[in-house]
Image (spheres, grey):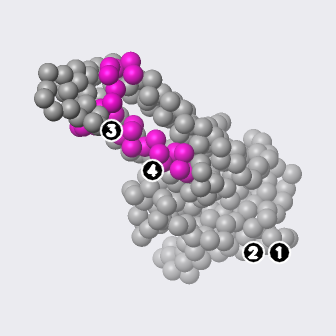
Amino acid sequence: MPTFKQSLIERFKEFNKSMISFLEKSSIGPSVNKDSYLAFLGPHYPWGDLDQEAKRLQTEIYNDYQHLIEIGRTFLANALPENRKQFEDECKPILEMTEQRYLTWYKNIADAKTSFGKSLDTQVEALNSVYGKIGEGSLLIPDTNVFIKNPNIHTYELPERSNILILPTILSELDRLKVEHNNENVRQKALTAVRNIKEYRRRGKLLDGVKINDRLTAYTIAVEPRFEDKPSWLDPNNKDDRFIATCFEAAAKFPDSEVVILTLDINMQNKAEFALFPYLDPEESGFF
């Protein structure tokens, strides 16, 4: 399974194919300075009109790129300033090329394609420059329903060496469920999960990682996610979105690890997919 960084870069490469296809359906007219008494000192080549198919593709790639920009910025939030700037500087020219609302410097589509390729390569280079902690094995991030289904993570049948990251949102939710849920079985499962986590903490610092068995190490993150540098479609008041936001924090901290969300919730699976995170249903995967 690829790392989050690899998955994100692969999406940028897929966007490259779509954008090239769109540019091949586009056109650029002769300079507006031709046969004119007034000369434009700035960009002076007009984009041509698009047919219906090109307009459809334009809308698709514009939305796709906006989505990738937000995730890219999130991934680079803790990167070096020069890498963030390297990424950011190329957003505007690519967006302008996508919108085709203004006059351009490009004399023809071949020039536009060459410039676009250089801009996207620069953004990929910025994403590729993100380094962080290197963990051994996959980084599995379970949501609350996984603990309610089986609170004993030390019994999970994992196929390979793995790390489980227990997020603050999940700890808060388990603490609430063990007291407030109207189903006794759910309360007991949440209580068992909390007791297990306390036992893991007794063995060492969960912030640094505590070895649970030969195949599993458990971690926690102490801080809640910062939403000011997260995608705009994440709602800080929604617990599932807070979960996804913290997964982004983990992906930035462990860019060269396989970050996988564990969930039985189909809505969470949809959100994970939209955020470019791979997910596993632990029941279907035989973890229990």
Residue located at (86% from left, 51% from top)? 214
Q: Amino acid at mark 1?
A: Arg
Residue sitting nearer the eye, 105 or 285: 105
Q: Quadrant of residue 17?
A: top left
Q: Earlier in the sequence, mark 3 or mark 1?
A: 3
* Of marks 3 and 4, the one in the foreground: 3
Q: Is residue 100 in sight in this rendering?
A: no
Badge 4 crowding class, 10 Å Cα cut-off, few under 14, some 14 to 19, many 20 or more, is some
* Of marks 4 and 1, the one in the foreground: 4
Question: Which residue matches tag 4?
Answer: 70
Distance Cα–Cα, label 2 vs label 1: 6 Å
Badge 3 crowding class, 10 Å Cα cut-off, few under 14, some 14 to 19, many 20 or more, is some
Q: Secondary structure at mark 2?
A: helix
Distance Cα–Cα, label 2 vs label 4: 36 Å
Residue 67 versus residue 34 in the image, above or below? below
Residue located at (65% from left, 75% from top)? 191
Question: Which residue matches tag 3?
Answer: 96
* Of marks 2 and 4, the one in the foreground: 4
Question: Which residue matches tag 2?
Answer: 198
Question: Which residue matches tag 1?
Answer: 202
Q: Amino acid at mark 3?
A: Glu
Q: Secondary structure at mark 4?
A: helix
* Of marks 2 and 3, the one in the foreground: 3
Q: Quadrant of residue 284?
A: top right
Q: Earlier in the sequence, mark 2 or mark 3?
A: 3
* Mark 3 touches mark 1? (CB < 8 Å): no
Instruction: Give coordinates of residue 220: x percent, y percent.
Output: 70, 66
